[in-house]
Image (cartoon, helix red, strand yellow):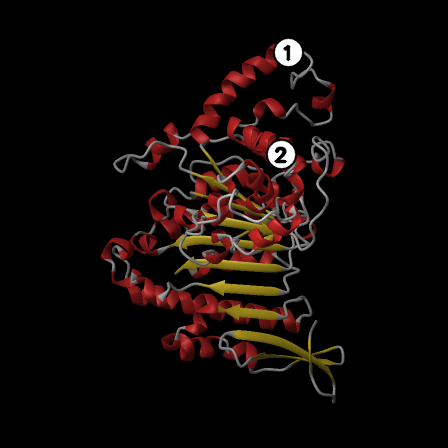
């Protein structure tokens, strides 16, 4: 427990702030990012800073900037959806902000403030009042299911009773948030369909990933910027022309130039007991993102949209899942400018998941392991062909599953096709090799007849 203010020495506030920094810890959403998504991923056992904040008003004022460096907020979509119809009626009655009559609407803009959920508005209002906006470096939004829990309900019943925002309203949400705070890291943790609703600029369709209703609980999307930009004044982000040229309004994926994209899709084990996946295709989030940028996951081709240009800033991709299907991971190809690919597809051996029948269901574990190895073989073959054709900027592949000693030999064989050949192109020789650390593959390049060097 911290010292009571009366017993503590009189020190400058700057010194107290430096002392309190030692009580801080890495956000749990970073520490637990590779675990199966659950609400526990945002919970920390370190409550020291919160305890300090209730000791005195002075200490609270000093410690608040540390607490809000990594902000986390939970959003109830059902409550938000219930607010929207009432807001719509009020907006329609006000000629000056009506979406059909306002000058802004003619430019594709709307008065976004009335559509913001009260929880978000309260959070942003507090951040502004306390002058904490510049210190927010990480923002985590946790969303629970948009339908009432009912294990016996069919997917159709759940769809009928679910409440989700439209793409335009979701776009307004992120424009509002990012006009007040400008975190270098944004994380959304939600069930697949709810995650789609607040990220994708396209409407959710009934046939999109019906099977995921019972397949997974939560998924996590992470977006990061390498450089933190000075926050813009309220409203500036919305009225930037670059953010308004979109059919549904700018989605979160294009509101900033994100350099890193992380996706944790949880466990696919229950899906191995059904053929729905093969009938319907890839799960919802991958579908929605790839459709947005013109990728057809079935044919493996682009429709010619500007997806490569729009996501050209993303050069690092982290993908985590538990036994995803090989066909599911193919859309990774649309990230043309990737330089680092970090993948983990097997459960933690210490988790005991594979011994828990409630988690494995009717899955044949041999099928699961075959799919895992197929993912890596496909990735290695794809990268070899892209390197050969000069279309790849990838310079590092991290296979986290190689840390499992029982998989090491099979994974080495899966990457054999990538590491064995030397690819000659335009007077240079490219060679992939595994580093001393298992599962870390680096691409080297050297001039013909000279020693190799690491690509940078």
Number of labels in the image equals 2
Do residues under tags 2 and 1 come within 8 Å of each other at their CB atoms? no
Measuring from the top left, give residue 211's x and y in whole percent: 36, 45
Instruction: State whether residue 445 is above or below residue 28.
Output: below
**Residue 86 in view of the camera:** yes
Q: Earlier in the sequence, mark 2 or mark 1?
A: 1
Per the rendering, the mark at residue 55 is none
Q: Which residue is mark 1?
A: 94
- Which quadrant is the C terminus positioned in? bottom right
Q: Secondary structure at mark 2?
A: loop
Point out the frontmost of discs 2 and 1: 2
Measuring from the top left, give residue 155's x and y in whole percent: 34, 37
Measuring from the top left, give residue 66's x and y in whole percent: 58, 47
Instruction: State whether residue 78 is above or below residue 185.
Output: above
Tell me how far mark 2 sits from mark 1, CA to CA. Answer: 31 Å
Which is more toward the observer, 388 or 178? 178
Q: Please give the name of the residue rendered at 44% of the width and 32% of the height, measured from the top-left corner.
A: 76
Crowd band around label 1 with a 10 angstrom C-alpha radius: few (<14), some (14–19), many (20+): few
Which is more toward the observer, 273 or 144? 144
Q: Which residue is mark 2?
A: 130
Q: Residue furthest bottom?
A: 449
Crowd band around label 2 with a 10 angstrom C-alpha radius: few (<14), some (14–19), many (20+): few
Q: Please give the name of the residue rendered at 61% of the width and 39% of the height, measured from the top-left corner.
A: 251
């Amino acid at each position: 427990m911290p010292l009571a203010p009366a017993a503590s020495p009189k020190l400058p506030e700057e010194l107290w702030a430096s002392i309190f920094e030692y009580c801080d810890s890495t956000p749990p959403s970073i520490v637990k990012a590779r675990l199966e998504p659950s609400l526990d991923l945002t919970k920390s056992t370190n409550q020291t800073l919160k305890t300090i904040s209730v000791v005195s008003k002075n200490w609270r004022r000093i410690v608040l900037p540390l607490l809000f460096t990594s902000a986390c907020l939970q959003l109830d979509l059902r409550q938000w959806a219930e607010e929207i119809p009432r807001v719509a009626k009020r907006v329609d009655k006000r000629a000056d902000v009506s979406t059909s009559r306002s000058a802004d609407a003619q430019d594709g803009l709307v008065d976004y403030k009335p559509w913001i959920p009260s929880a978000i508005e309260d959070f942003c209002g507090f951040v502004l009042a306390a002058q904490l906006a510049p210190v927010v470096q990480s923002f985590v939004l946790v969303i629970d299911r948009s339908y009432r829990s009912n294990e016996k309900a069919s997917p159709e019943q759940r769809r009928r009773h679910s409440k989700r925002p439209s793409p335009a309203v979701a776009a307004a949400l992120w424009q509002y948030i990012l006009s007040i705070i400008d975190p270098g890291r944004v994380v959304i943790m939600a069930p697949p369909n709810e995650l789609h609703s607040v990220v994708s600029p396209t409407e959710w369709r009934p046939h999109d990933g019906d099977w995921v209703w019972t397949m997974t609980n939560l998924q996590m999307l992470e977006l990061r910027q390498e450089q933190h930009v000075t926050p813009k004044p309220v409203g500036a982000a919305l009225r930037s022309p670059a953010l308004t040229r979109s059919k549904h309004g700018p989605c979160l994926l294009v509101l900033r130039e994100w350099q890193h994209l992380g996706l944790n899709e949880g466990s696919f084990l229950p899906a191995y007991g059904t053929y729905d996946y093969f009938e319907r295709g890839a799960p919802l989030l991958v579908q929605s993102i790839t459709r947005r940028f013109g990728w057809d996951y079935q044919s493996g081709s682009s429709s010619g949209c500007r997806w490569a240009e729009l996501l050209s800033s993303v050069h690092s991709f982290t993908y985590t899942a538990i036994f995803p299907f090989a066909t599911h991971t193919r859309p990774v190809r649309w990230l043309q400018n990737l330089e680092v690919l970090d993948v983990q597809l097997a459960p933690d051996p210490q988790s005991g998941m594979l011994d828990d029948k409630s988690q494995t269901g009717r899955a044949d574990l041999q099928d699961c392991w075959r799919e895992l190895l197929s993912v890596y073989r496909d990735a290695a073959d794809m990268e070899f062909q892209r390197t050969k054709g000069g279309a790849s900027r990838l310079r590092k592949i991290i296979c986290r599953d190689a840390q499992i000693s029982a998989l090491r030999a099979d994974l080495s064989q899966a990457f054999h096709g990538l590491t064995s050949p030397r690819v000659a192109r335009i007077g240079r020789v490219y060679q992939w090799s595994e580093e001393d650390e298992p599962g870390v593959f680096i691409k080297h390049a050297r001039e013909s007849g000279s020693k190799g060097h690491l690509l940078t």
